Image: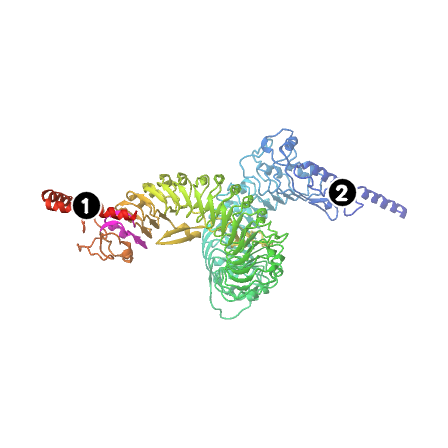
Amino acid sequence: MNMTNIKKVYIWLLFLFMANGWWCCYCCWNEERTALLQLKANIKYSTSDDYLSSWGANETTNCCGWEGIVCSNTTRRVIELSFGVKKISQEEQLSTLNGTYTDNILRNWLFNASFFVPFKNLKALLLPGHSLAGWVKNEGFEKLRRLRKLEVLDLTGNNFNRSILESVSQLSSLKSLNLSHNQIGSGSDIGFGYNKPGSGSERLSGLDKLEILDLSSNNLDHEHVLSVLDLNTSRMALKKLDLRYNRFQSFMPNEDLGALRNIEYLLLDGNTLDENFLRSSGVMSSLKVLSVAECNLNGTLPLQGLCDLKYLEELSLSRNSFIGTLPTCLGNLTYLRVIDLTQNQFTGNIASSPLSSLFSLEYLLIANNNFEIPISFESFANHSKLKFVIADYNSVIVHTTSKSWIPKFQLEALSLFNCSQMPNFLHYQHHLRLLRLSRCNIGGDFPNWLLENNSRLGEVYLDGNAFAGSLQLPFLPNLKALDISNNKIRGPLPPNIGSIFPNLVISTMSNNMLEGMLPLSFADMKNLECLDLSYNKLNGELPIGLAREGSKLYLLRLSNNMLKGEIFPVSGNINNFQYLYLDGNNFSGPIPQKLSTTPLQTLDLSYNNLSGNIPAWLGNISSLTSLALSKNHLKGHIPPDYCRLERLEVLDLSENNLVGVIPACFSAFRELKRVYLSKNKLQGEFNMFSNSYLKVLDLRYNNFSGSIPKWLGSLGITTLLLKGNHLQGTIPTELCRASELRIMDISHNNLSGPIPRCVGNIMQQALIIEPYPYSTSFGYPGFQTFGGDTMIDVESSIKSSSPIMFLNNYAWVGAEFMTKHNTYSYEGSIVDDMSGIDLSCNQLSAELPKELSNLTQIRALNLSHNHITGMIPSEFSNLQNIESLDLSYNNLIGRIPTQILELTTLAVFSVAHNNLTGRTPQRAAQFATFNESSYEGNPFLCGLPLHISCMETKEVPISPLGSDCCEDDTGFLDIESFYISFLVAYANVVLVTVVVLSLNPYWRNIWFYYVESFMYSCYYFFSSKM
């Protein structure tokens, strides 16, 4: 061929290439660009017009650069399609289906295989998380068998049921199939009226090349899953099987395990496995990864089966109930690089366990067990590959090492609790990214050197120690979480803390002894979201940088410091705050109105010196769930504007100078649980709370009047404090229905009538205690990614140990209650352990109901200063938990029952100033500690500690043979006999006087003379006064 002909051939070939789009070696094929645009047009959506905006119709654009498209570097053919699908309306779906199929299919976009067939070289089709409900008729996945190079199909996060299995079974070229998070285990068909599964339709047959199968989170519940899915055939090349989080109750009988002889990765977390599974697992001789977390396994680890997996590299037995020591044969797993034993009950010293001989270990995750962990960690000195040690909630033991040693490992993450001293090997660590030494009570100066040696640190948790000294913090550009709370750190915060930690997101330094002013450099922390510096000794004013423009700070807690001045000047930008705690400081002035524009959920300004009228504009913050303004100098009426706070759960306005009535519109509150309005000057009634789910109602020391509302008994109220008001009437029997009531104080009112017998019914229901601190919480599970080189889920085990948590509400929770002659403030979780009733200082009358003895859980009962009559019931001996019993200043009669000596928990006992008779209780046990004041004011009571001796010397038995009602009730003086004899003697004196005056004129004249003289004396006395 001459040169002319050769040139013609080259020109002709170049023309063909250009005609097919190969004039640009980096452009895609025109026919595939056209197919992609047709596919985009088919994906109908109604939420946005910019979906797949990079897919342009311009012929000059390269479709290989479009979103979700991957082309071959050599042929420029599309080899991977990955894109999302937007939801469409029901009307659009109806037009797609032409009204042919059932309403159940009215979900989302329907798959149409014809739009994918043009991509002949397609190797991967990824359609995850799009709620695909099915496919257009005759256009299912089976039509994709024309794509003979298709190896990867990802349909995770859709709504397919078992019908999908028959369709994808015809894709014989598949090597990886992901059907996780679908409804394959569902018993119903989701809109496949034309494709009901029949015999064999739910099997994955014919996928001989399949190596990876993911069926996790599909509600599969058949224990013979291998047979059902036709996976137990020897033709399959399956290497990875993921069946996590299904609903197996007894997974895989032994005969099925043999079908997995070639399996290398088996993930079964979140199912219930057969108790013999681990013992039989040895038949999977090629296994490299085995994860059986949360599988309800228990007992000791078997000596055979698991230990036969000699190629095992990753093993997770976490969150089961295994016990005992680790079998020594685990030391034979020399390839093991990841072991996760988190949340079991394993025992033994890890220094002498097989773990110390696994030199390939990189991840040692053993938190929440009963292991003994030597603080030296010397037995792992030669584990040069070790990077992650998470060992919280075990028993850390301290011992002296025989020699100094330098570890060969460089850790990236270390987590230990209760370790009591600083591990020495930390002096040689320089690659730490996560450091958690919480609640260790380690003393000495704050370990600034530890932070300085590890410049990669992203998270530092050193809370709950005894570190002292000052902070000399190094530059840590990657630090995002810092917790040094509950220590003894002194001195000021570094003035350049903002530039030291430029990327800090959350920090809590509460409960230390930090002092000085808040650094202005906090403004340099562009990503700071949560800051807690409460319970320190900080002073000065709030820096404007905490409320700068563009700030991300939404939680600020500066409670219990010595800060002063105004709460954020007018120039501050506080529009991001959701949680603001400035309580327990010396802030003064009015509450800034600029807070009205914030999305606050919690505002706590209590225990300050704020003044002025209580702001009405707070009612504009509709997001508020907790409002605490107690112990300030606020005045005025409670604004009706607060009725707009429909989400409010906690309202604390106590100890101010509020007047007037509670707005009637408070009846609109539905979520209100805790109301504190004590020590104000409020008046009227309080029926407006009848529609709320009140747990605590504290209205003490106000001027409320009327009767106790009957609706209080219909609530699940636990604390009712109405002391020091002007309430009248009787105690309503409806109040007895408050079976969850634990603390009731209605003393110092004008209540009258008898104590209802049904009062003994309260406190009878087992209290469903809302966990303290009675608030939801939020936190950050972590800021770093771990386990990128592992198949099992190690990240959850690494991050599971107590991340920084913040409460949605730190407002004061508790109750003030008088017991043992003192007023105590029961705060926090302590209030759950207190139970008491105070009805003192009223006008209650009638006899003591013996039903009060049913209050077996009560700790304090005060009925003093009333007009209660009758005898003390012997049944009071049932009050086995009572610590304070006050029945003084009443009209009780009779003897003190001897059974009361059985109350061994009593610390305070008083029956003073009654009309009791007989002998005081024997001075034994607790009663030997009570002095004369417990019995004084009973003139006919005798015996120690009174200074009145009894005529009879016979000791009163501690345990009488019969009840008091059957005993001879004679004593020093019977009160009824005394009254009768007195009246008879008085009548006799009057009768004798009349007889003498009528018979003897001389004495009669003298009598009338003195009467007349007395009358004149009275007359002159009153005349002189007038």
Residue 650 location in percent, x, y?
48, 46
The circle on residue 701 is: none
In the shown orientation, is residue 238 left or right of residue 939?
Answer: right
In the shown orientation, is residue 892 left or right of residue 811?
Answer: left
Q: Which residue is mark 2?
A: 29
Q: Residues within 10 Å of mark 1 (few under 14, many from 20)?
A: few
In the rendered image, the vertical position of residue 545 relative to residue 736, given as above or below: below
Looking at numbered disc 2 in the image, what kind of residue is underneath it?
Trp
Query: Quick one: SS at disc 1?
Result: helix
In the shown orientation, is residue 921 left or right of residue 813?
Answer: left
Looking at numbered disc 1 in the image, what kind of residue is underneath it?
Glu
Colour logic: rainbow
Query: Quick one: SS at disc 2?
Result: loop
Is residue 967 something that shows in the picture? Answer: no
Question: Residue 986 or 340: which is nearer the viewer?
Answer: 986
Q: CA distance from mark 2 to mark 1?
A: 140 Å
Magenta stretch bounds: 888-917
Question: Residue 42 or 990: which is nearer the viewer?
Answer: 990
Which residue corresponds to the image point at 24% horizontal and 55% vertical from the top-left?
Answer: 922
Residue 212 location in percent, x, y?
60, 46
Question: Residue 232 or 679: which is nearer the viewer?
Answer: 679
Is residue 307 something that shows in the picture? Answer: yes
Q: Which image quadrant for residue 116?
A: top right
Q: Which residue is mark 1?
A: 1012
Q: Nearer the viewer, mark 2 or mark 1?
A: 1
Q: Along the polypeptide, which appears first: circle 2 or circle 1?
A: 2
Residue 452 location in percent, x, y?
59, 65
